[in-house]
Amino acid sequence: MIRDSFNRVHNYLRISLTDNCNLRCFYCMPEEEYLFTPTSKLMQCSEIEALATTFVAAGVNKIRLTGGEPLVRHDAADIILTLAKLPVELTMTTNGTRLHKFIDVLNEAGVRSLNISLDTLNHEKFNKVTRRNQFDSVLENIQLCLENGFHVKVNVVVMKGLNDYELIDFVAWTKSTPVDVRFIEFMPFTGNRWTNNQVMTLNEILQVISDRYDFSSVDRKAHDTAKRFRVPGHVGTFGVISTMSSHFCSDCNRMRLTADGKLKNCLFSNGETDLLTALRNGQQILPLIHQTIAAKHFQLGGQMTTDFGEIDADKILNRSMITIGG
């Protein structure tokens, strides 16, 4: 097992396949023109398999593929089918624009759950946030996934003055559509121009929704990042990932492998371990994994206070969101 110094078992690995993306969401990708990692510096399919196999042998039983947008990689199908051979729950976070091209591959790989990013139900606002005209494609692919029996979670980064007025619209969507909407508090990363007055907190989100709907809590499972709720009579649910106002670090089980093969023990950690170079040099990987996780801080990467109003984003040492993989 992979444990940290707080006796938390880490059995969930998030693997970023690329820092490339076909959208340009401003809170994720700092600039329109972006210098992506050269292919030679990315983990190749066989290297992803080798590293993932090492993690699985050490107790990992869930792998999530992320990006950038994982489905823009030319060998994404090969990677998915290769990892599907491992004894893990395989899932993915995607912007949803290319899912129609991979629905058969995902079915073949036994993927049954997908996280799809969609920050607005307004076509014009979608274009503003993503700087791309792909709104219809995302909605159509969400429907396609539901028709194919996938469990669909919809990730919504909520920001005051941008999409906070759509909270009710998203909850209304769950009445007849079996999606799990997850409202995400806006988090600070290098280059995303985060300020604390943009954060819509858990309590603020629930207050807005309670003005329109009655709802009840859904029992939390171990390691859940979202506090989930259901409106009576709705087939879907909604929840809040309250990283900034009410963190959930106490039973964290997540590790992150960036597309260039660096292991991060926390989304907000300022340190990382280069597993890819070690692998290419023939070094033992497992000791590096244990050392990295043993050095994990108890909460928020050891960089941020639990009072997000006191956070100075310019002093946080981290990557941009797109180079971490979420």
Image (cartoon, grey):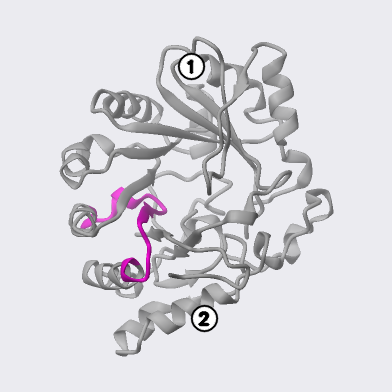
Q: Residue furthest right?
A: 310
**Residue occupied by mark 2:** 291
**Residue 113 vertical placement versus 274 (above, below):** above
Quarter of the image with the N terminus in it:
bottom left
Tag count in the figure? 2
Is label 2 in a helix, a strand or a loop?
helix
Is label 1 in a helix, a strand or a loop?
helix
Q: Amino acid at mark 1?
A: Trp
Check residue 173 in the rendering and tell me which mark sits there, or answer none: 1
**Residue 98 vertical placement versus 211 (above, below):** below
**Residue 311 vertical placement versus 108 (above, below):** below
Q: Name the side, left or right, on which 143 lies relative to 224.
A: left
Q: Amino acid at mark 2?
A: Gln
Q: CA distance from mark 1 to mark 2?
A: 45 Å
Q: Quadrant of residue 51?
A: bottom left
**Residue 99 vertical placement versus 166 (above, below):** below
138 or 90: nearer the viewer: 90
* 71 within the magenta span: yes
Q: Position of residue 250 (x, y in %)?
A: 64, 55
* Residue at 30% over, 84% down: 280
Magenta residue span: 56-76
* Residue at 23% over, 34% down: 100
Q: Assess whether mark 2 and mark 1 are in contact (beta carbons under 8 angstroms).
A: no
194 or 240: nearer the viewer: 240
Query: What crowding class fits label 2: few (fewer than 14 Cα within 10 Å), some (14-19), or many (20 or more)?
Result: some
Check residue 257 in the rendering and tell me which mark sits there, or answer none: none
